Each structure stands twice: as C-alpha cells, then as structure tokens.
C-alpha cells in the first residue's frame, strides 16, 4: 500500500494536469521542470502618510508590561512624517518586521507613536494601531493602542509572543529610507 493511499485518484490526476499532463509530470520527475512558489502580494500596503504633531494624545490606560518595559524611555526624536500601513493577511511579528525593512528600520519612537495617536484622535479615527518600539533595555517590542471610549489603552508584548495580528491591522512606521531620499 502506498503511503498516500488515503488520496483519491482524482487528487493525483489533478496534480498531473497542473504539471501539464503526462509529459509535464515526466519532465518534472526528470528535473527538467521546476516548481517555483508564486510570489504573494505584499504583506503591508500604505494606507496614508501623516505629518507629525506635538499634541499629546489622551492615554487613559497602559498595561503592566508597557509600564515595566517603557517607563523612563525618553520620547525620542520625532520623525517629520509617519506612514500608516495595513496588514494584508494574518501575520506574526517577524514577517511584519521583515516587511518594514528589519528591526532597526521598523522601530518608531514613543514621540512618533504619541503623535500618530494624537493625529488619529484629532481626526476622530479610533481604529487600533500597532508599532515596534525599543524599550528601556534596548529590546524591540510590539506596542499597540486601541480606543477605550474616552482615551487610548496602550499595551506591549514581546516579539516572540504567540499573538497573531489579523488582516486589516494598522501598523505605524517611519517612511523607508528610499522614500526620504
């Protein structure tokens, strides 16, 4: 009995048809035909770019993790421009960070994050947002904020968290270097 005995004849026939029939299947077995995984659509797409502002957002709650990791972190340098991106499909932190250009490129400052929250609040946009920030120990963390009715609730988690970010999640970043040139 074949180790694929649980598969139907139609399943195997579908594969042979996808390879271009018997000739294609034979070419595949002779290594004359190679399969290449189709490129996926980009993980992140730009939704809009915002000019930063110095207005303070209404932050009404911060999680214990956020307080522990970010208490005492200076606001940092405020970027002139920030980009809000939309997550195209479910993802964990590592692919998102890679799509943003790596750990260093993905990090925003606390000043950047507060500016984005203030802008969203001023516009009446209370959709949640996430970003990556470096904590007091120099460790990159994911930070998210959601509107709690009267202000922003800010939380943080480690990058190895099992958290899966859902499609549609907004991600804050600085513009890529090539966009600033």
Image (cartoon, rainbow, N blue to C red):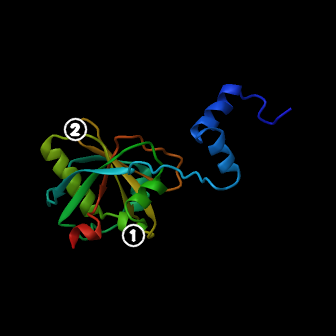
Position of 5 compared to 148: left or right?
A: right
Give the structural element (helix, strand or loop) at label 1: helix
Tell me where residue 28 appears, x and y as whole percent: 65, 49
159 w.r.t. 128: above or below: below
Tell me the quadrant of the picture where the N terminus can be found.
top right
Q: Residue furthest bottom?
A: 181
Residue 72 figure quarter: bottom left
Tell me where residue 149 appears, x and y as whole percent: 24, 35
Q: Which residue is found at the position 54% from the left and 53% from the top? A: 36
Q: Residue furthest front?
A: 23
Label 2 – label 1 distance at C-alpha: 33 Å
Give the structural element (helix, strand or loop) at label 2: loop
Q: Nearer the viewer, residue 55 or 85?
A: 85
The residue singled out by tag 2 in the image is 150
Q: Nearer the viewer, mark 2 or mark 1?
A: 1
Residue 2 figure quarter: top right
Position of 124 compared to 114: left or right?
A: left
> From this viewpoint, is residue 103 visible?
yes
Q: Nearer the viewer, residue 123 or 90?
A: 90
> From this viewpoint, is residue 158 visible?
no
How crowded pointer 1 is (Cα within 10 Å; few <14, some 14-19, many 20+) is rated as: few
The residue singled out by tag 1 in the image is 104
Q: Nearer the viewer, residue 72 or 12?
A: 12
167 w.r.t. 160: above or below: above
Q: Which residue is found at the position 38% from the left and 51% from the top? A: 42
Position of 160 compared to 3: left or right?
A: left
Tell me where residue 93 appears, x and y as whole percent: 46, 53
Tell me the quadrant of the picture where the C terminus can be found.
bottom left
Tell me where residue 22 appears, x and y as whole percent: 66, 39
């Amino acid at each position: 009995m074949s180790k694929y005995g649980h598969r139907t004849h139609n399943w195997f026939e579908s594969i042979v048809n996808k390879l271009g029939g018997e000739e294609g299947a034979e070419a595949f077995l002779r290594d004359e035909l190679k399969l290449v995984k189709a490129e996926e659509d980009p993980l992140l797409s730009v939704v809009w770019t915002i000019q930063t502002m110095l207005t303070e957002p209404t932050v009404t709650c911060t999680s214990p993790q956020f307080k522990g990791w970010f208490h005492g972190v200076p606001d940092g340098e405020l970027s002139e421009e920030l980009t809000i991106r939309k997550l195209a499909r479910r993802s964990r932190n590592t692919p998102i960070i890679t799509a943003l250009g790596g750990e260093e490129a993905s990090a925003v400052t606390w000043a950047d994050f507060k500016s984005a929250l203030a802008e969203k609040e001023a516009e009446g946009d209370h959709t949640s947002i996430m970003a990556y920030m470096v904590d007091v120990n120099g460790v990159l963390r994911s930070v998210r904020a959601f509107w709690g009715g009267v202000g922003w609730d800010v939380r943080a988690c480690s990058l190895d968290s099992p958290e899966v970010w859902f499609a549609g999640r907004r991600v804050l970043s600085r513009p890529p270097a090539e966009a600033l040139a």
